[in-house]
Image (cartoon, rainbow, N blue to C red):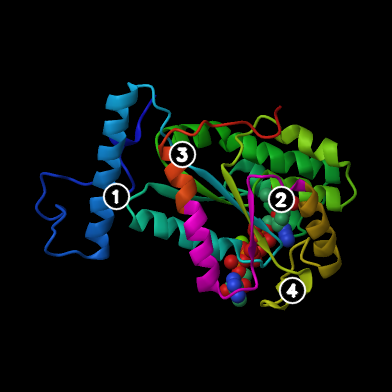
Amino acid sequence: MHHVCCISASRSIKFGSAATRPSFFSFSPRSFGEFRTAQIRMEKARNELINGANTESRGACIVLEGLDRSGKTSQSTRLVSYLEGLGHSAELWRFPDRTTSVGQMISSYLSNESQLDDHTVHLLFSANRWQKRSLMERKLKAGTSLIIDRYSFSGVAFSSAKGLDFDWCKAPEIGLLAPDLVLYLDIPPEKAAERGGYGTERYEKLEFQRKVADCYKVLQDPSWKVVDAQLPIEEISKQVQEVGLKCVEQCLKGKQLSLLWSS
Ligand code: Z5A
Ligand code: MG
């Protein structure tokens, strides 16, 4: 198993280089980030000395969910920058991942360029996540936190809002990695629709978004933190950063990875 201390963090410190050596006399945000990286590595090394080489230190899997225009992309981008600024290794992911072959089929469906049966598209969304599952596990185990803009909860909420059976929708997601934290950006569908208006994508319709909101409610579990998405962006960021950082620290200390919807 890899540990945080032996993999390169997003901004690793080159101790031999005067240009990147943290200086206590020029305490810029960048050098603070580097200083924090070194601290994290030292904490990690100390944990290994205490617990042996088998500590399960890893990155955190944090998912942002919510209706269209609830602010997921804004907040996930900010959370990644915040964590990186503290010296943590973090990456922004999103689903659907439109760069894969399956993702391209989904993208053309969402933009109404192709038609697919509802069950088929549901399975494609799920396959799109399975395509990334092993990379996801490798990244997390190597100490990188993944901040993910939409995940399986979107899959189930959107497909069951179309009338597909709820348990049938969950089934293909079973065995994917479970997030450590789900940040649900809560906003009434009418308010979300006022934000720049909806575009031309298939699901961007108020009536449908209302049904999606109801389906999301059924999915909530203790890993969810509901955030009021009508607050100013800065205020939401503060809340997201606070719980996000706590989650990252728990995972660094060795919280076990678990599987989604597996008993
Ligand atoms: N889908 C599915 O069916 N099955 C699946 O398994 C998955 C997805 C994974 C992909 O959409 C579609 O695929 C989605 C679900 C379905 N369909 N819908 N609807 P997407 O992820 O590509 O796009 P989106 O997330 O739905 O929409 P979005 O425009 O990207 O919304 P957002 O990321 O949540 O919001 P944002 O871009 O951060 O902000 C939107 C605007 O609001 C922007 O102008 C911001 O500046 C503004 N904003 C953000 N926060 C605030 C606050 N706090 N106050 C005021 N204004 C704000
Ligand atoms: Mg978005």
The disc labelled 1 sits on which kind of residue?
Arg
Dot 1 or dot 2: first in sequence order is 1
Badges 3 and 2: C-beta atoms under 8 Å apart? Answer: no
Q: Secondary structure at mark 2?
A: helix
The disc labelled 4 sits on which kind of residue?
Ala
Q: Secondary structure at mark 3?
A: helix
Q: Is residue 105 magenta?
A: no
Dot 3 or dot 2: first in sequence order is 2
The disc labelled 3 sits on which kind of residue?
Cys
Q: Looking at this view, is 219 or 8 the one in front?
A: 219
Please state the horizontal and vertical placement of residue 179, each as a whole percent of the image: 59, 41
Dot 4 or dot 3: first in sequence order is 4
Badges 2 and 4: C-beta atoms under 8 Å apart? Answer: no
* Residue 27 appears in the picture as rendered: yes
Q: Does mark 2's beta carbon lie closer than 8 Å to ligand 1?
A: yes
Q: Which residue is mark 2?
A: 154
Q: Which residue is mark 3?
A: 251
Dot 1 or dot 4: first in sequence order is 1
Mark 3 → mark 1, Cα distance in angstroms: 19 Å
Mark 2 → mark 4, Cα distance in angstroms: 18 Å
The disc labelled 2 sits on which kind of residue?
Ser
Q: Mark 2 Cα within 10 Å, few/some/many (few <14, many 20+)?
A: many
User: Which of the two discs, 4 and 3, sits closer to the camera?
Assistant: 3
Q: Which mark is residue 11?
A: 1
Q: Which mark is residue 193?
A: 4
Badges 4 and 3: C-beta atoms under 8 Å apart? Answer: no
Segment colored magenta: 219-244
* Residue positioned 46% across, 32% down in the render: 138
Q: Give the number of marks.
A: 4
Residue 220 sits above or below residue 82 on the image: above
* Residue positioned 64% across, 33% down in the render: 176
* Residue 114 appears in the picture as rendered: no
